[in-house]
Image: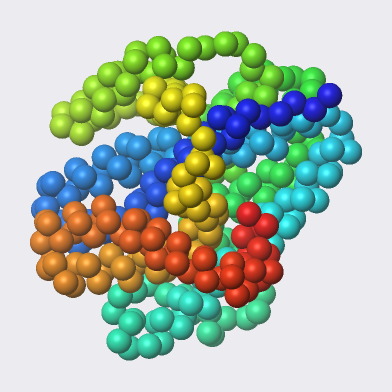
């Protein structure tokens, strides 16, 4: 008999995914160190939200959620292929569209002089490359361990992992969580490999499907949050660096803290369907991910142009760009859903 995810947990996944997506956009809203050189407050601010939180929670938790949802109710090999088929529409096609969109828009903006100054970089070199190079750089790897739409490396890795899911199904069936140790060894003792690292967190999500231990998440959050805050203070103000061998533990601890903190602040009586604005925001999470670049580059630079190239201007630009793009996207998606509903559905995989 198929198991069902409770409405509270379903809402939790949607809301946390939205918050993680805002974190990703915040990450990509960072100003380069050449721009904020000597502005200690801005360097610390970006390190707080990007270096400490985004790089140690956001991507890993996204992969865990993806692995959990893929392996949920995965009963036999035929159900694996069934889910793979669904992922073609929900992941692969949106990935192809978003990669193409990024390259087209980036090139277009760079060729318009008044707008070009808002771009840090554009793939103009493609205009002189062969079709083979264009396809590889656009959809797989341009030499920077990701496609030209660099933010989509997560989706590229997820597609590769899902393509290997029949093998993972049998590994999970016979090795269970012991395979996590194998992935850890490969990831730790070999050079950094984003596919292996992505697989690690995806497979942890798969193993959580069978996790039945009952835990009081509110009490857990009360224990974890003070430690979480203390670690942030030590890293931020005392420049204490965590050795790589402890990074895995720290990332897992951060994820547990974020996951349990939700239950501490959100009551069991909460229902997402009773909040129309939040529901609409959660419904466009995938759209935000696919299409936030290169537009946020224009937004963050425009803010600094208005407020000035100073500490305040860079701080406001960094912190507000994700929310400006979020609310602009709400209007854009409402328009697209109303007048181009079928095209929009294809672009976001039916979400």
In the drawing, does residue 18 fall left or right of residue 23? Answer: right
- Seen at 59% across and 52% down, the residue is 155
In the drawing, does residue 8 fall left or right of residue 165? Answer: left
Q: Is residue 327 above or below residue 178?
A: below
So how many labels did they put on this image? Answer: 0
Instruction: Pinpoint residue 256: horizontal percent, then vertical percent.
Output: 45, 23
- Seen at 27% across and 56% down, the residue is 320
Please state which of residues 6 and 326 is positioned toward the viewer in this rendering.
Answer: 6
Tell me the quadrant of the picture where the C terminus can be found: bottom right
Tell me the quadrant of the picture where the N terminus can be found: top right
Q: Going by the picture, which residue comes out furthest to the right?
A: 78
- Seen at 34% across and 56% down, the residue is 323
Q: Is residue 224 above or below residue 331?
A: above
Instruction: Pinpoint residue 125: horizontal percent, then vertical percent.
Output: 48, 79
Q: Is residue 107 visible?
A: yes
Instruction: Pinpoint residue 284: horizontal percent, then vertical percent.
Output: 52, 55
Residue 55 placement: quadrant: top left
Instruction: Pinpoint residue 300: horizontal percent, then vertical percent.
Output: 28, 65
Q: Going by the picture, which residue comes out furthest to the front?
A: 274
């Amino acid at each position: 008999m198929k198991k069902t995810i409770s409405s509270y947990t379903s809402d939790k996944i949607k809301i946390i995914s939205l918050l993680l997506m805002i974190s990703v956009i915040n990450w990509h809203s960072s100003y380069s160190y050449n721009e904020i050189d000597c502005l200690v407050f801005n360097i610390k601010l970006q390190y707080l939200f990007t270096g400490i939180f985004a790089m140690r929670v956001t991507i890993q938790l996204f992969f865990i959620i993806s692995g959990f949802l893929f392996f949920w109710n995965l009963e036999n090999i035929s159900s694996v292929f069934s889910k793979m088929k669904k992922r073609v529409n929900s992941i692969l096609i949106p990935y192809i569209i978003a990669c193409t969109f990024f390259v087209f828009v980036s090139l277009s903006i760079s060729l318009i002089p008044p707008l070009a100054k808002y771009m840090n970089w554009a793939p103009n070199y493609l205009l002189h490359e062969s079709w083979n190079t264009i396809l590889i750089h656009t959809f797989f790897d341009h030499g920077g361990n990701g496609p030209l739409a660099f933010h989509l490396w997560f989706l590229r890795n997820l597609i590769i992992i899902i393509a290997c899911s029949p093998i993972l199904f049998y590994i999970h069936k016979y090795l269970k969580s012991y395979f996590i140790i194998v992935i850890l060894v490969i990831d730790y003792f070999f050079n950094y490999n984003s596919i292996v690292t992505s697989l690690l967190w995806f497979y942890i999500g798969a193993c959580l499907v069978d996790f039945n231990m009952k835990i009081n998440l509110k009490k857990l959050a009360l224990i974890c949050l003070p430690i979480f805050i203390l670690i942030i203070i030590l890293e931020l103000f005392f420049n204490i660096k965590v050795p790589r061998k402890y990074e895995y533990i720290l990332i897992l601890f951060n994820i547990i803290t974020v996951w349990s903190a939700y239950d501490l602040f959100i009551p069991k009586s909460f229902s997402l369907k009773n909040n129309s604005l939040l529901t609409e925001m959660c419904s466009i999470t995938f759209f935000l991910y696919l299409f936030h670049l290169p537009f946020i580059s224009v937004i963050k630079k425009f803010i600094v142009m208005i407020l000035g190239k100073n500490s305040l201007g860079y701080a406001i630009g960094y912190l507000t760009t994700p929310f400006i793009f979020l609310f602009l996207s709400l209007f854009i998606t409402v328009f697209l859903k109303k007048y181009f509903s079928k095209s929009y559905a294809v672009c976001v995989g039916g979400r």
